[in-house]
Image (cartoon, rainbow, N blue to C red):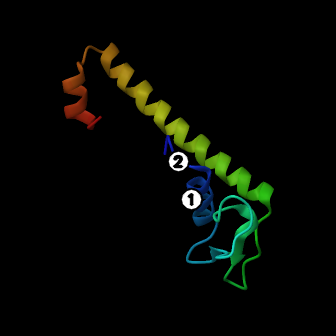
Amino acid sequence: MDNWSDQKWLNYALSKMHTGCWYHFKKDFTGSHRQSYENIIIDNTEITKPSEAEVNAKIQELKDKYLASKNKKISGKQKLKDLGLDDDEIKALIGV
């Protein structure tokens, strides 16, 4: 996730907003990327297209959640080192 493109984050956020296949992207797209907000087509008539602000907020929420998880792993590993465990012991214990 560290080097995900904007398009990958967009797809991930959309997939977390609803279940199932509820959207796709135009084949004859506009802009520089096919997978962009302006090219989203909603397939499910029960779902309305989220606003661009809602999509961007979901992307930021997911990025923040990922970063918090990553930071907790780093912090936890450091705490184990502070308790005297070496890298091999930590890896054997938690797999990282």
Residue 39 rendering spot, x and y as whole percentages: 72, 69
User: Seen in the image, is 74 located left or right of residue 48?
Assistant: left
Q: Nearer the viewer, residue 69 or 8?
A: 8
Q: Nearer the viewer, residue 87 or 36?
A: 36
* First reached walking from the N terminus: tag 2 or tag 1: 2
Q: Residue 81 falls in which quadrant of the image?
A: top left
Question: Residue at image x 30%, y 15%?
Answer: 83
Q: Quadrant of the C terminus?
A: top left
Q: Which residue is mark 1?
A: 12
Residues at discs 2 and 1 in contact (Cβ within 8 Å): yes
Foreground mark, 2 or 1, reads 2
Badge number at residue 4 = 2
Question: Residue at image x 76%, y 57%?
Answer: 54
What amino acid is found at the position of numbered circle 1 in the picture?
Tyr
Q: SS of the residue at dot 1?
A: helix
Residue 61 rendering spot, x and y as whole percentages: 65, 47
